[in-house]
Amino acid sequence: MAMTATVGHAHADPHHIGLVVEHPGPAPKRTVTAYGFWVFLLSDIVMFSCFFAAYAVLVSQTADGPKGSEIFEQRNVAIETVCLLLSSFTCGMASIAADVRNRFWFYLGMAVTCVLGVIFLVIEFREFADLVSRGYGPSRSAFLTAFFSLVGCHGLHVSAGVLWLLTMMAQVFAKGFRADVLRRMMCFALFWHALDIIWVGVFSVVYLLGSGV
Amino acid sequence: MLGKLDWSAIPFDQPIPLIAGGVVLVGILAVLIWVVVKGHLPYLWHEWITSVDHKRIGVMYILLASVMLLRGGSDAIMMRIQQAIAYQSQGYLPPEHYNQIFSAHGTIMIFFVAMPFVIGLMNLVVPLQLGVRDVAFPTLNSVGFWLTATGALLVNLSLVIGEFARTGWLAFPPLSELSYSPGVGVDYYAWSLQISGVGTLVAGINLVTTVLKLRTKGMNYLRMPMFCWTTLASNLLIVAAFPILTATLAMLLLDRYLGFHFFTNEAGGNVMMFMNLIWAWGHPEVYILVLPAFGIFSEVVSTFSGKALFGYRSMVLATMAICVISFMVWLHHFFTMGAGPDVNAIFGIASMIIAIPTGVKIYNWLFTMYGGRIRFATPMLWAVGFMVTFIIGGLTGVLVAVPPADFMLHNSMFLVAHFHNVIIGGVLFGAFAGFEYWFPKAFGFRLDERWGKLAFWFTFTGFYITFVPLYIAGMLGMTRRLQHYNVAEWRPWMIVAAMGMAVLSIGVICQIMQLVVSIRNREALRDRTGDPWDGRSLEWATSSPPPVFNFAFHPDVRGEDAYWDMKVAAQQQSLEHDELEYRDIEMPRNSPTGFVCAFFATIMGFALIWHIWWMVILGGIGAFATFVVFAWRDHDEYVIPAAEVAAIDRVNLEERRNLVSMAGAI
């Protein structure tokens, strides 16, 4: 957003506002890529907000099935949350390592991020499998439909993130820290942190609020 | 092995879709054979299919939209004929077929005609107007286009393999749920929209980033041409609204495929939630389409009046106001659902408020024309036709924004006439105006004016003959989507409407003739200056068609109407300096990523529709692999040497100099 203020062209401004800030020209590629990815993340958050809205609408529609407080297990959710928040930290470490071109710390940061993400996914998968085996699958009630969709949508994003993470590691291994690889790494980090933010929403709206009811 | 797919999917007992499908298939085959025999395939592959040039992608978008316009138009003709003859009889279309036709008509016209047409024009023009060499993400741009094409392909495939939805263009549940629509029609609908929706989202992100981050030196926000502003507003809406459509259709698909209960009647599902979600996307969608059209009219009116746009800043403000308010009116699509008087009143008022910025725009265009030297070239005819037509459509819109009136007119032919009045009069006229206006820029020769004017007059009168009767029929109580009816008073109006459709069709034929005649006479219609209309914005400051790099130098912008100022001051650096220091230009390399990705998306979509799970996995792996291959390439740019840039640029510079000096002599 570097803009240089020049008063020189003020006469070209037909409305005589006075100070005209001249646009310096096209932004560098790194800025453009990051900006575009931010816009994508915002759109992704809009999509999540639909699932949040659906959950809010359907949360009381249990159709004589279980309520949230009857099926949520605080301990598992706490572990999941810790895993994901920690993974954001290790992802940040990997980003720093990439910026200073340190392969060892990059691989280590990414590997730990990956392991934490996979632990999160395994816990979530087991929670889902357990619910389905008890007859509380998404077809049981509209509440469970909304619950599985919202949490599952986040889980799908994390899975995609893990796939991207592994591809990213392979690419650094094959191509090194090229400019385009670094841009991708930046996007991946943004994505991973955004998933964290969404998890905070899921955690609060679904598990915290749901446990009390 | 093939899921639900077997020979019963081919409608051997229904001659109409079979013949239509056969004709299309023969047509496609003929074109393919011609391309291969003539040896055009390598050219098409290298220069178009794998192209990441925003201008080429824009042209392909518009081509897709034009072809689909013919398909959607055929549906319209069939419906008008059906309603003209189906008085106290079944007509010639059985109900299950008629229902597919009106569903396909709406889906195609919005998603595969209007959307690609405006996105195509934005792609073609916006980087040129901003004075830059490409969009923010050229390869993604290509991916977006090909995914849109995939969606269109799937919709057309439903003609001969299986069926299309019978639910109307928005597939309201519970009708669209598995229990009431067990066939593959709704799946065709939903998956083609999901896939093309991804394409649209990609295009939206790309264009938002382009406008906000890639502008030439001195191109401040308040110096951008109006079309760039409306592009920004429209694409912001795409980014904010299309994810809602994706989520909503995903929920519907989960209901259908995995027995979820988002919108079912059982187990606590909520049908009203679908209405709210789909229209939370659907109303902004209306403005996604019409805002770029407003931008086109702003450019056209200003150019052909020979004046700067009146009230530029109020126009910017009005555009952004519409952008925001468009998210606050969705409930007026279902006043009759019983949300209560308070809610209905609020949304009614919000809907009327949106008429204010729109009115500001109309007055701005009128005042731009006032005192100007107006040239009634074809684009200007479309613009003036738009103003008349859109005001009528807008006023009937304000009428149905009054909840009590809407209770009478909801789902009537009056509503059908209203939204055709604004979509044809606004979006389609805008698309045609933009097509006529920028065609010389894209191809280097003008379009034939005589056929263009004929096309306008037939379309314009045909529109009124078709849709005024529908207003009247709606007032007489006729509801929409009737396969047959028994009310004698409606009959004459349906016959008049069918005749209007015939006039409209002549307009379409004139449009095609215009293209044919112009291509034949292209040498006589050639534009060598790059500025055939005496334009005002930067797209006219380069040759027609522009070189792949658009501008040899990034233009230095000093005010609104950048190119006009340059011409007036003759201060364009290239005009005053003979010895220019040309530099090497780096451009993104072409890539088949978009095409290959769409190929796998087509396989995946088709497999999902027919429950062929192994093929779904195959398609998914293919799409992922495509992106990995793309990410792995080592050279993503190529260099155009300075000498070549100079050679290309000097030719056009000479012509341009002559033009300016001639104008100076006069």
Image (cartoon, coloured by chain):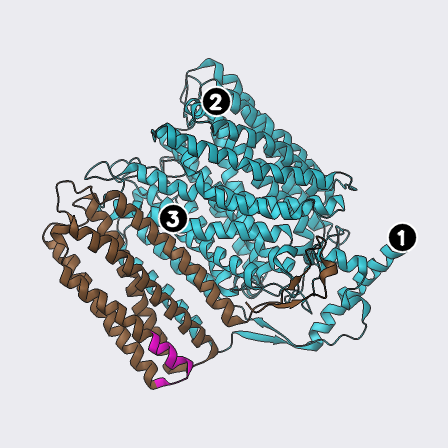
| Span highlighted in magenta in the image | A92-103
Colour assigned to chain A in the rendering is: brown
Quadrant location of the N terminus of chain B in the rendered image = bottom left
Q: Which residue is mark 3?
A: B244
**Disc on the earlier residue, 2 or 1:** 2
Residue plotted at (56% across, 59% down)? B211
Which one is nearer the viewer's eye here, B215 or B413? Answer: B215
Residue depicted at 12% across the width and 47% down the height: A66
Q: Is B15 on the left-hand or right-hand side of B393?
A: left
Q: Which residue is mark 2?
A: B474
**Measured Cα–Cα span from mark 1 to mark 3:** 56 Å
Place of residue B132 in the rendered image (x, y in percent of width and height, measured from the top left): 62, 64
Q: CA distance from mark 3 to mark 2?
A: 31 Å
Q: Between tags 3 and 2, which lies in front?
A: 3
Determine the residue positioned at 44% across, 64% down.
A37
For residue B633, above or below residue B433: below
Q: Residues within 10 Å of mark 3 (few under 14, many from 20)?
A: many
Say what amino acid the circle numbered 2 marks.
Gly
User: Would residue B521 be seen by someone viewing this image from the given angle?
Assistant: yes
Mark sitting on residue B666: 1
Kindly state the secondary structure of the residue where label 3 is placed: helix
Indicate left or right for B159 with B436 as reference.
left
Find chain B in the image and tell me its colour.
cyan
Q: Give the amino acid type for the residue marked by disc 1 in the picture.
A: Ile
Q: Where A118 sits versus B186, above or below?
A: below
